[in-house]
Amino acid sequence: MITQDDLENWFVYHSPSPEQIPHYQAVRDAGRNLATAILEHTPPSADQSAAIRHVREAVMTANAAIACDGK
């Protein structure tokens, strides 16, 4: 069940701690690598765009997990 505390945590800016920065970078690098592979190995199409959009969403959601410390 979603609580008001959850909303407070999710909808506030979380400054990255020094310990989190390499985790953000690793996720961004992996996302970029997958998006590059999709771009290079699939024909331009709505499916290609959707695949890259999902990679972007996955990276953003993973960043939220880092920022919110899994909460």
Image: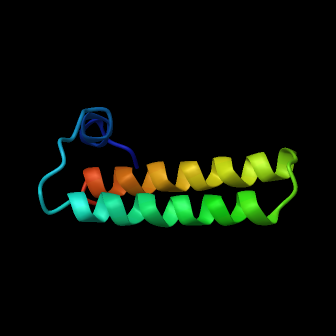
**Closer to the camera, 9 or 24?**
24
Give the percent coordinates (x, y) of residue 16: 18, 48
Left or right: 8, with 40 as reference point: left
Q: Residue furthest left?
A: 18
Location of the C terminus (image quadrant):
bottom left
Q: How is the image coloured?
A: rainbow
Q: Can residue 56 be seen in this view?
A: yes
Residue 8's place in the image compared with 39, above or below, is above
Residue at 41% x, 63% y is: 27
Residue at 36% x, 50% y is: 64
Give the percent coordinates (x, y) of residue 29: 44, 63
Residue at 63% x, 60% y is: 36
Left or right: 42, with 59 as reference point: right
**Closer to the camera, 63 or 70?**
63
Residue 40's place in the image compared with 17, above or below, is below
**Closer to the camera, 40 or 58?**
40
Q: In which quarter of the image is residue 69?
A: bottom left
Give the percent coordinates (x, y) of residue 56: 56, 49
Residue 64's place in the image compared with 26, above or below, is above
Give the percent coordinates (x, y) of residue 24: 32, 58
Q: Can residue 71 be seen in this view?
A: no
The total of numbered circles placed on residues is 0
Q: Which residue lies furthest to the front in this view?
A: 40
Left or right: 3, with 55 as reference point: left
Q: Quadrant of residue 51?
A: bottom right
